Image (cartoon, grey):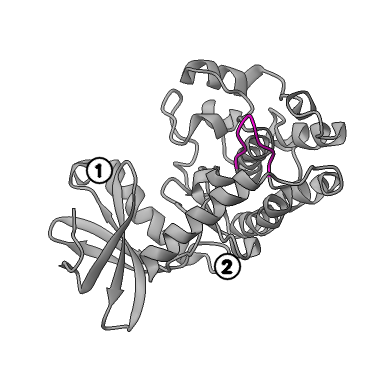
């Protein structure tokens, strides 16, 4: 692990921003360019895995090819001291998991919808460019609390191009986060733009009710539910949610990818019934967002 003040590949490390299963992300300065960057470094143990190295390279290559204000902006990549690294534009936001309500709170739907609209738009942009993200979930969305419309989609590590002959995967070998995986991925069938829409709909269920569609305890049970169980009724989980929203989300969670909406934007646009019926968000939820944002700002200053 790098420490503040360490020099790595021409960057000067300032602080640790976060840690994932296979990588570490630092705030760093790039003296040659006179800018601040988020420096992501593949962990030593992940460097021993060919697939992990390939996913890391693909994350940069695919995201670097997509120029959209709500897709994480990649700067450069390379290798140093036996590790792979990439740099990206820092995002002064918090993970959208902060928007997930608890059992005692209600979602901040105004912030949620303001965040979902640009995320849906950037997914549609990626799909038009022939890319499927494959890992859409709350933790891969960074929310800018002061301006949710500036929220950013991150982590293209398992993204695929639609013309990639390997995009179907292998049956029984699933990459992604099980609570948000579309049935066609579990069946090792072809990917479609609506594959991401299914994952976005799973995230919406969690944003509104506090739980993903199928909150079971084992991967097998969740996978079986994605393949064969009907979508949940959100109005049964939270009484204030209109039944019209049940129907909107159910279509996006259709088992057949061709039965879903044509675009992610169409899905989000149909959630407008939520605007007038949701109770004001509790101070505790807004406070969690503000505290998270202050922590991020503190590391960037």
Q: Position of residue 274 (x, y in %)?
A: 82, 44
Which is nearer the eye, 285 or 119?
285
User: Looking at the image, which residue is at 87% across and 35% down?
Assistant: 244
Q: Earlier in the sequence, mark 1 or mark 2?
A: 1
Q: Considering the numbered disc 2 on the image, is that residue within a helix, a strand or a loop?
A: loop
Q: Which residue is mark 2?
A: 68
User: Looking at the image, which residue is at 35% across and 74% down?
Assistant: 36
Between marks 1 and 2, how big is the CA–CA gap? 30 Å
User: Looking at the image, which residue is at 30% across and 42% down?
Assistant: 51
Looking at the figure, which quarter contains the C terminus? Answer: bottom left
User: Can see residue 217?
Assistant: yes
Q: Residue furthest front?
A: 283
Residue 128 in the magenta stretch? The answer is: no
Q: Which residues are magenta?
A: 100-107
Residue 104 in the magenta stretch? The answer is: yes
Mark 2 surroundings: few (<14), some (14-19) or many (≥20) residues within 10 A: some
Figure quadrant of residue 104 = top right
Give the overall secondary structure of the magenta segment: loop
User: Can see residue 181?
Assistant: no
Q: Which residue is mark 1?
A: 50
Which is nearer the eye, 197 or 163?
197
Mark 1 surroundings: few (<14), some (14-19) or many (≥20) residues within 10 A: few
Figure quadrant of residue 49 = top left
Does residue 131 appear left or right of residue 208 in this picture? left
Q: Position of residue 78 (x, y in %)?
A: 25, 65
Q: Position of residue 214 (x, y in %)?
A: 61, 23
User: Looking at the image, which residue is at 68% across and 32% down?
Assistant: 209
Q: Considering the numbered disc 1 on the image, is that residue within a helix, a strand or a loop?
A: helix
Give above or below for 277 relative to 110.
above
Give above or below for 213 relative to 162.
above
* Numbered disc total: 2
Give above or below for 10 relative to 265.
below
């Amino acid at each position: 692990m790098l420490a503040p003040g360490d020099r790595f590949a021409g960057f000067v490390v300032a602080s640790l921003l976060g840690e994932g299963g296979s990588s570490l992300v630092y705030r760093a300065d790039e003296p040659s360019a006179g800018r601040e960057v988020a420096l992501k470094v593949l962990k030593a143990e992940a460097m021993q895995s060919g697939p992990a190295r390939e996913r890391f390279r693909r994350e940069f290559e695919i995201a670097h090819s997509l120029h959209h204000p709500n897709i994480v902006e990649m700067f450069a990549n390379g290798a140093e001291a036996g590790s792979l690294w990439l740099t990206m534009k820092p995002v002064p936001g918090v993970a959208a998991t902060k928007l997930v309500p608890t059992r005692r709170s209600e979602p901040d739907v105004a912030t949620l919808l303001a965040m979902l609209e640009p995320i849906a738009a950037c997914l549609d942009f990626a799909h038009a460019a022939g890319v499927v993200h494959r890992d859409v979930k709350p933790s891969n969305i960074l929310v800018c609390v002061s301006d949710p419309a500036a929220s950013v989609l991150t982590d293209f590590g398992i993204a695929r191009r639609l013309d990639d002959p390997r995009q179907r995967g292998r049956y029984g070998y699933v990459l992604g986060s099980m609570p948000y995986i579309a049935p066609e991925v579990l069946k090792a069938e072809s990917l479609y733009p609506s594959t991401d829409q299914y994952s976005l709909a799973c995230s919406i269920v969690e944003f509104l009710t506090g739980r993903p569609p199928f909150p079971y305890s084992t991967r097998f049970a969740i996978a079986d539910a994605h393949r064969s169980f009907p979508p949940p009724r959100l109005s049964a989980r939270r009484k204030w949610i209109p039944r019209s929203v049940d129907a909107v989300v159910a279509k996006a969670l259709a088992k057949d990818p061709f039965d879903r909406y044509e675009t992610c934007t169409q899905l989000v646009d149909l959630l407008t019934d939520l605007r007038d019926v949701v109770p004001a968000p509790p101070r505790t939820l807004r406070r969690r967002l503000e505290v998270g944002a202050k922590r991020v700002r503190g590391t960037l200053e």
